[in-house]
Image (cartoon, rainbow, N blue to C red):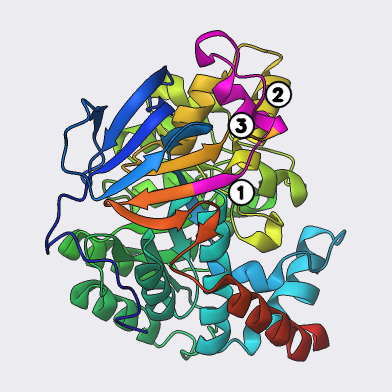
Amino acid sequence: MKGRFSQPSMADETSGLVRYTDSWLIDVDGRPHQGDFILRPDGDWLRSIGDEDVEFQVDGDGRLLTRAFQNWHTHLAMVLNRSMGEGLPLMRWLEESIFPTEKGLTPEFVEIGTKAAAAELIATGTSFACDMYYHPEVVGEVLAESGLRGIVCGPITDGLTPNFRAGSGDALRHVEGLVRNGSSAPDRVTFGIATHSVYSCTEELLKKAADVSNATGCTLSIHTSETRQEVADCHAEHGMYPIEYLDSIGYFQEGTVCAHCGWVTKREMRILAEHDVHAVHCPVSNQKLATGGTMSYPAMIEAGVDVRLGTDGAASNNALDMRAEMKAASLIQRHDHWDATLLDPVQTYELGVRGSKDWVAWNLNDIRMRPIGRDGRRLLANLIYSNGNCLDMWVDGRPLRRDGKTLTINEKHVFEQLEDTVQTYYAKV
Ligand SMILES: [Zn+2]
């Protein structure tokens, strides 16, 4: 797949600067600016005075620039499972719909599913995913080739995985090899270890993964306290709730990614904060699978936890669009806490773009983005609650999408492959 793209890397060449004229721009602080802007390849922006040596010039009239969204919990290739098993309760959904398809998973299926997911990320304004799925070397290559950023975490459990013997340690050795060798785009794509959950990994395996993370600096990710059953089972077995248990065995490393955190105590929140863990709110997945509990955002913030936002896989969400996730986060937090002041549009935007260095341009000639309002004050709320088409995406000064067309992925080809795979294999199970 190498060498497909004609755009020069930033190491060559050229200024890498992009100029938008007569445009709107909103950085992470949520303040709208209007005028001519320069986007730098390092992610910074400044007002244009018109004489800069730019590589790309865009007529920004009718466009809003925002930071690209960051999706902190995905199983990208599960676009293959999108909309399967609708209406089944959680365990039946897993056992009748998800697990049977994963038994026959091949690297080719993962490549097709991840390409489709990458196309969806770009088309909906997301430039980063923290992924957890099988065949991580394939996922990493697809993200690298598509120009996106990612932390690609290879899954580790004590059970059977599609290509490793149960309990052999082979899966961890394989992922450690990926971590140590790095991806083909090391500045954008790194590998990490996904210890799936406390109920699917033994204490020994969790500790081994933590040791590898400690030695290499790679990211650990784990599903944590997603369901009440998981929390009750952990307490019955260890006398501790999942985050207390993980802390007691020395699991947490700085920057560990904990997905869900729907059923956690305030004591556990303080543990997350102590270790600089990223706690990932996944409100749509939790509601779709009826887990009965979602993260308490204000309590997490009060405890000093770094909260991020994620869709989870397309199977448990039916979408990877972060605007829908931001809207759901805002609504569920207000509803759960009887507090309409929680997660206003600026706070919600900041949650969705936290850590972003990239830019997206949205189409303002779209009724969903109107009215702009005085001084552009309605722009963010429109984007989060009403949406609008993504026209351009810039990562490290490179365009992944221009004028509503993705440049780094052949979407038509991906759609055909996706349909073909689903109809020949996934439809049978
Ligand atoms: Zn997940």
Which image quarter: residue 334? top right
Looking at the rendered structure, the secondary structure element under dot 1 is: loop
Residue 326, image x, y percentages:
59, 35
Q: Which residues are magenta?
A: 367-391
| Residue 75 showing in the rendered view | no
Residue 427, image x, y percentages:
81, 84
Instruction: Between label 2 and label 1, give the one nearer the viewer.
Output: 1
Residue under label 2, please give it: 336
Question: Which label belongs to residue 384?
Answer: 3
Looking at the rendered structure, the secondary structure element under dot 2 is: helix
* Residue sitting farthest toward the right: 87
Question: Which label belongs to residue 321?
Answer: 1
Which image quarter: residue 97? bottom right
- Callout 1, which amino acid? Asp
Q: Are marks 2 and 1 in contact (CB under 8 Å)?
A: no
Q: Is residue 148 above or below residue 80?
A: above
Mark 3 Cα shell of 10 Å, populated few (<14), some (14-19), many (≥20):
many
Q: Residue at x 30, y 72 (%)?
A: 6
Query: Which of the two residues, 81 or 145, is positioned nearer the viewer here?
Result: 145
In the rendered structure, the answer to whether residue 230 lies left or right of residue 70 reads right
| Residue 165 showing in the rendered view | yes
In the rendered structure, the answer to whether residue 22 lies left or right of residue 292 reads left
Separation of disc 1 and disc 3 at Cα? 11 Å
